[in-house]
Image: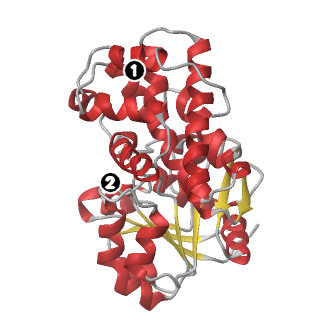
Amino acid sequence: MAGGMNVAVFGAGSWGTALAILLARHGQRVRLWGRPQDGVEAMQAERVNVRYLPEHPFPDGLEATSDLEYALEGCDLALVVVPSHAFRSFLRSAGAALRACGAPVAWGTKGLEHDSAKLMSEVLDEELGPGVPRAVISGPTFAGEVAAGMPTAVTVASPDAELATRVARAMHCETFRAYTVDDLVGVQLGGSLKNVLAIAAGAADGFHFGANTRAAVITRGLAEIMRVGDALGARRETLMGLAGLGDLVLTCTDDQSRNRRFGLLVAEGRGVEAAIEHIGQAVEGVKTAAAAHRLVERLGVDAPIIEQVYRVIYEDLPAKAAVHELLTREQKPENL
């Protein structure tokens, strides 16, 4: 057991709550922060997040609070798990307290910033400064399975090997394996772009195209992630690992994925807003599709699946027309 750390987890959604439960179960002292409107007082009183993980009571050592300064008292690690579209605004509002605390900042947020297409590490640099010790946690994870203690593996990336090891040890146990790498860019890219590709995989299954098509979407989607990674200096072995291929396979093949379910609904003829409303939670790939479109345009990278998902969501291209455009592209060698 790697007990003894004081961890502040910011973001009381499903993933933030699951990580808080995991850390507390593993002997850390955890304060889970959320805004009052998130029902944090009720979580603390009832010892469960009824909205997101109602079947998983809080273990001892987990406390819910809406007081940011209290969450950071004596903090050894600040773990940010807010949605990507709220990442900058959270850091801006909490920046003074985070800097005063002096703890390393880790995040479990997956996605690109919508308007700028920046990685969360770039946003962190701009809001807190480039000298803040940082780490990112990513990999093939569904929150409910982590909270239930089902065997899971993730990657912790940091340019500081010692910090990566500390963060990994805080979570690592017999049902949760945490591996370490120093490729911050690759781990973030894999966790971001897979959401867009899961929409495409869901749409393909919604059209009943079969297992061959699903495998092709995943494989060619990985090729697109690797091309973006090459342009940004990520390592291909990272993108072939848990935070790349692992997360891509998970998100493209299981209906626990909101992004996959969104693609299924779009293939059935639902509009974008109607599909999001039906799912009832944020569909990260919708915003990431716009950011990914900006990113691949800026880099000059060929990413036809990402581009077609963008056009379906933001240019009202019918999903069947997007499929036709993908299937009628010029024949080419596989490795280009």
In the picture provided, is 226 more to the left or to the right than 197?
right
> What is the C-alpha distance between the residues marked 1 and 2?
23 Å
Residue at the image point whose x is 45% and y is 81% from the top: 72
Secondary structure at badge 1 equals: helix
Q: Position of residue 226 (x, y in %)?
A: 61, 44
- The quarter of the rendered structure image containing the N terminus is bottom right
Residue 28 to residue 240: above or below: below
Q: Using the image, determine if residue 29 lies above or below residue 17.
A: below
**69 displayed left or right of 77:** left
**Amino acid type at mark 1:** Leu
**Residue at 46% in and 30% down:** 305
Q: Which mark is residue 135?
A: none
Asked if residue 67 shows in the view, the reply is: no
Badge 2 marks a residue whose secondary structure is loop
Instruction: Give the total number of marks visible in the rendering.
Output: 2
Residue 162, percent from left and from top: 73, 77
- Looking at the image, the residue that sits furthest to the bottom is 100
Residue located beneath label 2 in the image: 114
- Based on the displayed image, in which of its 4 quarters is residue 86 positioned? bottom left
**Residue 141 image offset from top left, x and y in percent:** 58, 44
Q: Is residue 218 left or right of residue 176?
A: left
Using the image as rendered, state which of residue 155 and residue 222 is in the foreground: 222
User: In the image shown, does 264 or 291 lie closer to the viewer?
Assistant: 291
Q: Residue at x 66, y 73 (%)?
A: 159
Q: Which mark is residue 264?
A: 1
